[in-house]
Each structure stands twice: as structure tokens, then as C-alpha cells.
Amino acid sequence: MSITKIPVGILGATGMVGQRFIQLLENHPWFEVAWLAASDRSSGKSYAEAAKWRMRTAIPKKVAKLKVSAASPEGAPKVIFAALDSDIARELEPQFAEAGCAVISNSSAYRMDPSVPLVIPEVNPEHLKLIETQTWWKKSKGFMVTNSNCSIMGLTIALAPLQKAFGLESVFAVTMQAVSGAGYPGVASLDILGNVIPFIKNEEEKMQEEAHKLLGRLKGKQVEMAHFGMSAHCNRVPVEDGHTESISVKLRKKASAEKIIAAWREFRGSSEVARLPHAPAEPIFYDERPDRPQPRFDVDRGKGMTTTVGRLRPCSLLDWKFTVLSHNTIRGAAGAAVLNAELLKVRGYLG
Amino acid sequence: MSITKIPVGILGATGMVGQRFIQLLENHPWFEVAWLAASDRSSGKSYAEAAKWRMRTAIPKKVAKLKVSAASPEGAPKVIFAALDSDIARELEPQFAEAGCAVISNSSAYRMDPSVPLVIPEVNPEHLKLIETQTWWKKSKGFMVTNSNCSIMGLTIALAPLQKAFGLESVFAVTMQAVSGAGYPGVASLDILGNVIPFIKNEEEKMQEEAHKLLGRLKGKQVEMAHFGMSAHCNRVPVEDGHTESISVKLRKKASAEKIIAAWREFRGSSEVARLPHAPAEPIFYDERPDRPQPRFDVDRGKGMTTTVGRLRPCSLLDWKFTVLSHNTIRGAAGAAVLNAELLKVRGYLG
Amino acid sequence: MSITKIPVGILGATGMVGQRFIQLLENHPWFEVAWLAASDRSSGKSYAEAAKWRMRTAIPKKVAKLKVSAASPEGAPKVIFAALDSDIARELEPQFAEAGCAVISNSSAYRMDPSVPLVIPEVNPEHLKLIETQTWWKKSKGFMVTNSNCSIMGLTIALAPLQKAFGLESVFAVTMQAVSGAGYPGVASLDILGNVIPFIKNEEEKMQEEAHKLLGRLKGKQVEMAHFGMSAHCNRVPVEDGHTESISVKLRKKASAEKIIAAWREFRGSSEVARLPHAPAEPIFYDERPDRPQPRFDVDRGKGMTTTVGRLRPCSLLDWKFTVLSHNTIRGAAGAAVLNAELLKVRGYLG
Amino acid sequence: MSITKIPVGILGATGMVGQRFIQLLENHPWFEVAWLAASDRSSGKSYAEAAKWRMRTAIPKKVAKLKVSAASPEGAPKVIFAALDSDIARELEPQFAEAGCAVISNSSAYRMDPSVPLVIPEVNPEHLKLIETQTWWKKSKGFMVTNSNCSIMGLTIALAPLQKAFGLESVFAVTMQAVSGAGYPGVASLDILGNVIPFIKNEEEKMQEEAHKLLGRLKGKQVEMAHFGMSAHCNRVPVEDGHTESISVKLRKKASAEKIIAAWREFRGSSEVARLPHAPAEPIFYDERPDRPQPRFDVDRGKGMTTTVGRLRPCSLLDWKFTVLSHNTIRGAAGAAVLNAELLKVRGYLG
């Protein structure tokens, strides 16, 4: 019954990730979209008028009629999903945390802030403790939690069991990223039809730094960054959804293909995490077919929350090579934030 | 005047690379297509009937009317371009060399044979000397010369000046390859529209071994393979022509970005090579724009014979990262073989 | 419980439509896939080995293990879905009908045969009566029923309520058809990436003749073809699934936009048909957005069984113009046959 | 020698059509780009800085260094090519004509103005006489001439010889238009990858009205619109360049396929027009292959100035059906304006 659901708001509700939030939260057992904010030009319109809806499912009827609010904390619910451009996020998100909101953000603005947790529930849920070091928390029980960039998300999930079982020494990553990662209108068709663009602004830097925080260890009140070498090349390809990545790794301990595959297949979040509504039954699916994963066929595995790995084989330079595929706007953005919110809820952070 | 031109034949004339040979040899100053062979089912038809022509220019009129011959040396000219599938090449090419033909092959069958030169005129022209070690040469002045796989061609050209100036220690390569590399019909549209296929059979192996032979040194009557570590990941993307590659390298000597770019820009074949009709004015073009090279816009540079390099930047794992783009059916296949033939001609190997 | 389900077989089980049959019949309340046949080269293999599975969902586990049989009626179940190339269908399908099977065919071979019903359950279910005129039926209770070509299916559904309410005088249709309509491997990527192919063999002829039979009237023991002029142009476009069609019509009676849209929105099959498991809640959805329908966003409406119509506006040459979109391998092929089978079942034809 | 060339300016120089103007005018025998104007934000920058260059050839060196001027007639040359959005054109173009400039415009703003010629040199060169009715001409020898919309250009060229030989009664046209027709950034990749958009704002209206003016007859000081019925459906498809159109026509006189094809093949502009630098040797090429024309392979015929027609066959509703392909940013935009300028020059209108 919806009376018992927690009302949530979405900042940046008309963009691609905002739309994914609305799609994923339709019929959510715990949360209910009650408030939407977007840029000034949308404010006051109904959501159906304001958004150029680009999802394959229809706009949920109740959401279609919601009036788009101005992006300020007055009148906003206490749980806020944020899908804002970085410079806008930098300004707006603290205002909501200040006002006592739980800000569950997909934006990059505060991901590397030492007091802001950058969390993947299956990988580093203990980082949530950082919340309690935030000034906002102390003052108003408001806080901020972030999820990672879409290009490092699936890779980090694939690396986590390797780090645990064998230790990570170095990681080489080349991405082939979907256009939905650039938002809407985003990449012009004249730029990408039949083309590859070997450049995505700031993406290589984000991948490298976020990986070290995600795989780092909470020591007291701060995260000790993980120690491993990493180099990323980021490319855009004419794919709608799903980032495919060619990965080579050097491990600290000797591993066999069998053990690596077993580590992936057995990888689960804690039982607390595994029971969350958006937690995939298998966080990682290892596909044995020689030509998989492929975005067109595998991106929706686990409703877009499962990372698919394939093609494990020896690397003549580092130790092992493989391919990772992850849904960039679900597991890599809106779904990640929803899963974070679910974990926050069961841990009692949502009041 | 065509009476003075050298008549040449094409084995595998109806395939994609065969069609490129015909396109590139139209109006060639030295060579004239005089004989075409294809599979039995084409034999006896006119070329226009036998081939499903897929080039953007029209079939040259004289070629359109040529009758397709059976693929045997009787009646064939003494200079043969071969564009055959590997297992057919393995059987047929030696028959032509045996019969006294110069077999200039794009096939992979004999590339790694110790007595068969694998040549890029700007890079290792001296390897042609191997011809004189071939039994065919001794018996009939027939011989075989090969060019490399399309995925290693542009990369080798980009590596050659680095090897010379700084020494190569290791090379990491991830390819995003065009569909024309798989021939016709080749990749099914249902497999590649909006998709990435992270697998091309035997391609990673070929890249790794051919690179070492191409960059190796002729010592007496054999090629000493180059010593450097190399690892390749090969992917197919929905691009018509042009293989884009994300590359990281470790060099033996310290280099600066300026010196590397200068090495690329100054790279030229010998003056003998630079004057060949198909030699590009610039074998390597370094593009300073932050988001280049891109296949849609850069693949035809130097009529498809120039390798475009861009995005040089430090690599946190090896030393330097960059992107390479090369036309896979021109520089990486038919154009490579034509350039080899031109070099053979000026060196007196074509009789 | 599966013991009560009707076992069904699939002829041509490894092709694109065969795969759709398997996908749609997974968890079907009445039917259970019990037998699969394909070409000789697949025979004896498990289905998982024999098929190059191209659906986005996984192969149902029980089906994966089924052994592929030879394509002959011995050992086959009494209900057969057929997804064969036309010339093979012409030979094989009668053998199954002869042997007492219900042959529910997606092939074009017998669609225009006067004794074979060509049926869309919402449009002309009464044509099923033709079964009883078939010699097979009389001898063995075997029979044959067909569904239409993928390119005329959605259009016929959109035309049916117009024919009923206003009468049809003429229909102009230009299709932009998805590559999945050509099967697998089907259209080569080199032919369709960034391209339009203005030709699909025999497609315009099929559209024109099948439309007249589908919208014809059963008079005694035969179908009187509908009387209206029709002209079709068929094009292939780089779209995975979903045929989009630009349509102009001339009606016999004056109509208004409101009345036409109402006719579409109110269109339902009989209550018998509306209760069938694969019958969409709305056979036709009229989308008021000015730039819809679009295959990427609308093709899956009603699980691929709903035809989406949009852009109704006056035609300065005929009376009205509009755009139709229909899923070509679901509503236009496998889903159509499954719906036919469901109707046959409730009418008692499946024994 | 460039001293004798006529200096020309380009309004809207940074857009897609502006870039095509620059590409086509490189090495033009009569004209030299001497002045470029764009929006205020570009003004003062060098062209290389201001434009996001999207052509496959490089920016001509002299143009790269030209400073972008403000869009006002002061300092502008007397021959102006205009590639402006319609509402900006409506305001700016008259200012240039007023100031004594020849405004050769690709914009739609004044195409249907009774005193402004809408001209295709091979089709209706006599319409240029309208210039002399323009107030600007009388006052300052300034004037305005336009070319048609990209979607009606190739079709009109294909219709002109049919109109002349057989008379036109009605025309049915369905377009499949390339993304470059929408400018840059234009169509978002998320909107068009693997998709068809059945709507282009105002395009159907423009096609219908411009066709009647182009094929109309100059009677004294005005154009008498041609009399024929016409209906257009416009669609966007994922193609880079080249509008493909499925056409049916009803003719006033009986025609045979042979006569129609002969009319197309023999179609030439006047000898005055045929000698213009950008006039294609063949304005229309009829391709007999059953599956042509196709944009990927045929769009560049005649350097993008030839219209390719194919698939002539009877239409069961009107008389004949065929497919037309025309390059939308060359023949359908910049090339059309350049050809108009060339005709104006030989007729003495450029001073």
C-alpha cells in the first residue's frame, strides 16, 4: 500500500538518468516518486510536458501528471535521488543535504570528497560509515552518498572478487561506451553513426581515481585508497546501452582460469545486500561462449543489474585478459543509486 | 600507353579485397588487370556477372567484361595479387609460385613462413631479400611476398619510428575493427547493428606474431623476430571501413611527447619507397585534435594509405597511450599488396 | 502442470522465426515445445548446439537439451509450427498435414492457396472454416493454416476497422523494414549499415495479394477477395525489429480524424479472440505524439502484439495518411502463428 | 589566378551547409571565399576556431584563417551564399539584398515569395527573370535567388523530364531522409540509432508547395504553379548523407518504361547550363540494377550532383513507381546554390 512507502524526489528528473530513476522506481516496494525537479524552464509544467521521454516503457501515469518543482529543498521530500550535471550538482546537492535530506547522487561532483561515501553495495558497503563524519549529518541528519561513474562500475564489480582472492597489481582498461552515457541529446548522430570517437572528456581520469576509492578500505573515518596501477582508454561507439570493456589484469597471487571464474560466479554481496529489491541474483555472470558478452544481447541480464564477464584468457603482458559488459544507465547510474538507497534504508539511514 | 604496362592477375577477385585490388589498379601507371580468378561457381562468367560489386566507384569498364578464369596458373600472367581465404591460399598460392609467378599475397597462410617476406615498404623493405632463399625463386623465378593482417598494419607503421628512436619494450593494443575486415557477406547485420562483438577468430594471435616479424631484423637469410612484449584484444564494431586501436607502449629509452610526435611526423620510407605510386606523402599523420582520429572522418587520409595517430598522452601503467586508425581494406590489405608490388617492380623482381 | 499441455513441434526451429517460437512458447499455458526439426546438418544435435541463438532472453533450459529431429512427420507431435523457407515449405508442409498434423505455418508457400486459411484472429477468424474443405482434413484431420507476411500484418490490422466503418477504396503503402525480417544471417552488415535498400524480393507482390485475401469475405467454401486498389513499395532500413510503414488510404465513405481514431481505438477481436493468451489487450494503439510510432521505442508494445498507429492527417492525393508500426517477428510471424494456434485450440481443431 | 576571381561571402558559414559551401568552393574557377559570417558567438574568431568542421576533407587553409565577421552587409562582398535558419534568414537576407548583394540562398524563408526565383538550372532557369521584378534589383542591383528544399530537389529533377514528355497528373512521395539534412548537432544519436522517425517538421508542406513552383511556368512577371496532385510522407532514417524516396506517379499521356527511362537518360540542362562548372555530366542516372539506388553506394555520383533513379515498374494505383536518390547537402543544398550562382554569373547578374 502506497501510504507506507517513503516519498522520494528526483533532482534532474527530465534527463536520461532521471528518466531511468522514474522507470526503476515504478512499483518500487519501499519508495514512491513524490517530487520532481528540473531546470527552470521545466518548472511548473507537468512531467509529461517537461520531459522528452526516451524510455521504452511508458511514463508511469502518476508521474506523468506530477508538476515539476524548482530545484530547491523547500517542499522536497527527505530522500532525494540526484542526476545532475556536475557543476550544477556541486552547487545544489549540498543545499539539500544541509536541509536534512538524504542525497543519493549519481553526479560526479562529490564522489572523491573524503567524507562522501562512493559505494557499490556488493563491494564496499562499509564505506557508508563515512556518512557519520559529514557535517550535514551532525547538524540535520542530512547526508550525501554517491555511486560511481558508469564506466568504472561494472569493471569494479568484476575486479572486487579478484582483489579479494588474489590481490590486484595492475589493471588495463579500454572502454567502448554506449551513447546513452552522454545523456540526451548528448552525442550527435552525425558524430557517431558508423564511427568511433576515441575521447570522452574526463572519463579516463574518473575511472582511474574512482576505482581506487571503491576498492579502498575504510580505516577509521577515512578510506585508504587501494594500491594498484591502472590505465584507461575511453572510446564512444554506436551502441545504445551498455559499456563493453577490454580488460587486462596483473594479480598479486597466482591464479588459474578455473579459480578466477569461480571467484566471479561465487561473488555475492552480504546477505543483507542480497535481499535488497534491486540486488541482482547474480552480481556477476560469467558467459562461456567465446564471443560474449555483447551489449545488444547481454546488457539487460539481471534487469540491467548483472555485470557480464567473458573471454577469460591469459595475457602475454599482464596475467589475464577478459571482457566486461555493464548496463551504463541501470547498473552504472540509476540502478546503482536505487540499490544504494535500499541499503541505506535497511541500515536505518533514511529515518 | 597500356602496351607497356605489366599484366597482372587477381586470385579471389570477387571478394572485398579482390574488389579493392581492381579499384586501386584502375589507371595504375605500371600494372594492368588482365586476368581474374575466383571460385568455380564464378568461372566462365564475366566479372560484372560474377561479382557482387560493393565499392563506391563503378567497376572499371574493361574489368567488367573480363571473363573469370579458373584459379590455376595456366594462362595466368606472371604477377599475381592474391586475396584468398587462408586454407585456399595454402593450397593455391604455391602452385602459382611454382609456375614462375610473383605471388603478392594478402592471405595469412604463409606470412609466418621463415622464407616468405612479410613486408611493409616503409618499415622493413630489406626483408624482400628472403625471396632469394625461396626454392621457387631458384627454380623458376617465381616467389611469394605477403603483407600483414589489417589489424596490425597501421599499428606497426606507428610503432616503427618509436622502435627506431626509443626501442620498444611492450605494446598493449585493443582494436575496434570495421566490418569490411570480415569480407562479404561477412558479419550479419543482426550481429553488429548497435553492438560490439569482442571476438575475431585468430586475430589476436596474428597481431602478436606478425608484429614481431614485421619489426624484426634480417640477419643473413632469416628474420630475427623483434623482442618486445605484446598483448592484443580484438573487437568488432559497427563501422564500415577503418580499424581504430587504443594503444599503450613502454619504450626502452626516455621519450617526450614532442619527440614522439616528431618521430611520427618525420617518418618516411626510403626515397626509393617514397616515390612509389601508392606511397602516401605522409605514412603517418599525427592529428592534434583531442578527439581524433575517427574512422568516419579520417580513414581516407592519403587515399587510405596514411595511418592517422592521435591522443598521445602519458600512460600510468606503461609509458604512453595513443590512438591509431588505419584503413583496413586499403592500407591494411589491397593497397599494402599493391605497394609491395611497386617496390618489387623497382627492385627488378617482376622480370 | 505440464502433463496437460499440448505437445507441439517446430519446423525450422533454428532460424530467427523458429527461435521466436521457442521464446514465445516458453511458459505457454496450453502448449509445450516437445519436438524440434531443422536442416539435416542440425539433425541429431542438441538444440543448444544446433542453433545460433539470437534472442535477448536465454534458451529455455528444457529446449536447450532437446535433440533436433529430422524434418519428417514420424515421431512428430500433432501440432506443428512451421517457419520454413518457401520452397522447403512447399515440399514439407503437405507431408505433415497428410500425416494428420495441424500445420500452423508462417511460410508463404500456401498462403494464397484457395483452401488454406490466411488468418489474423482479430480480423478474419471465420476464414478458418476453409480447413474443412481441405483434403487432408477429410482424410486424417490434418490441415494447414497460415499467417500473413510480416509487412502486411500490421497494416491489415490497421485497415480492418477502416474497411468495416468506411469501406476501403485504395491503399498506398511504403515500408521501411527491419533486418530481422530477412532471417539470419540475412542482410550483410556491409549492405545495410548507414544505408537503405529499396528492394525486397517478392515482398511488394505478397503484400498486395495477401491484403486482399485477409480482408476478403468467406462466401460458402471460398474467400472472395476484397476489392480495393493497392500499391506497395518495400525498403529495408538499418533497424533490428519493427516494420514502419507510411500509408495513404482512400475510403468509400466520408470520415473524420476523430472517427478514424475511434475506429482504431475501439477495434477488438471477438470476445473469444480477446481471451486468447497471446491476444493483446489493444490490437491497435493510436499514439497522438506527432513523431510516433518509432520502432526503437514502440515495437514492443503489447509484448510485440500491438500494432501502433500514428500521425493521422489528411492526404492531398487520397483521403488520409498515417504511419503504422508492427513487430515483424512477433506480431508479423511467430506471435501471429501462436495466436492462430490458440484460436484453433479454443475452436476444437487441435483434437 | 585568384585576382580575377569573384569574392563571395557565406552567411551561416559554420553550419553543415556552410561547411559544404566552403568545401565545394575550394578551387572554384570563378569564385573565391573571401568573407564568412556566423552567429555572434563565432564573430571575431578564426574560422578554424569557430567551426566544428564535419566534412571528410580538410578545411581549406586560407579559409581556416579567415576571421568570422558579424552578419551584416558592411564589408561583405557583393555575392553572398546564405545557409541560415529560416527565421534568421527572414530578417537578414533582405538586408543584404537591400545593400546591393546577390543573395543566393539555401534558406526556406523566401522560396515561395512570388518575386523570388526558386531555381534548378536544368529545370527552370527562365525563372531567374523574376529577379528583375524585385525592388532591390531596381534600387541597388541587389537581389535574391533560392534553391529548393533537399527533399524535393532530386525528385523534381526526376519529374521534370516526365512532365515535359508525358505531363504530370499526380505524385506520391515517401522520403527516407539522411541525418545531415537536420544540420549539426541536429538529430540526437539516441533518437536515430536503429530507428526511423516518421516526422520532419514542415517538410511535407515544403515538398508539396516547392514542387509546384519549380515545375511551374513563368508567365510574364510571375510563376504559374504547375497543376498536379501531390502527397508526401517524410521520414528520417539512420543514414549519413542521401535522401532516398519511394515515388509513384500518374502521367497525363501513356508512357512505356523504355520511353520513361529514355526521357531520364536524355535529360540535360540547356547547353549554357551544361557547361557550368558544377553541372553534372548526367543530371539523372538511371540504374538498372534491381536493388539500386542506395545511399551508401550511389550518393556521390557526379560529385553528389547527379540524381540516381532506379526500380521503374508499374504502379497498380497510379501509373509508375520508382526510387530516387539525391545528395541532400550537395545537390540538395550547397551544390544547388553554387550551380545557381554559376548560372547567374554567365547570365551577367553578378555584375
Image: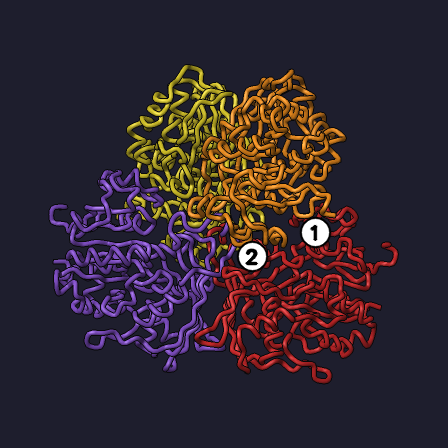
Chain colours: A red, B purple, C orange, D yellow
Left/right of residue B40 with respect to residue B180 in the rendered view: left
Percent of width and height locating residue A257? 53, 73
Q: Nearer the viewer, residue C304 or D239?
A: C304
Circle number at residue A295: 2
| Residue at x 73% of width, y 66% of height | A104
Q: Which chain hosts label 2?
A: A
How many other residues sit within 10 Å of disc 1, few (<14), some (14-19) or many (≥20)? few
Q: Nearer the viewer, residue D42 or B165?
A: B165
Q: Is residue D200 visible?
A: no
* Position in image of residue A93 (x %, y %): 72, 66
Is A180 on the left-hand or right-hand side of C283?
A: left
Residue at 40% across / 73% down in the picture? Answer: B230
| Residue marked by disc 1 | A41
Disc 1 marks which amino acid?
Arg
Q: What kind of residue is marked 2?
A: Pro
The mark total stands at: 2
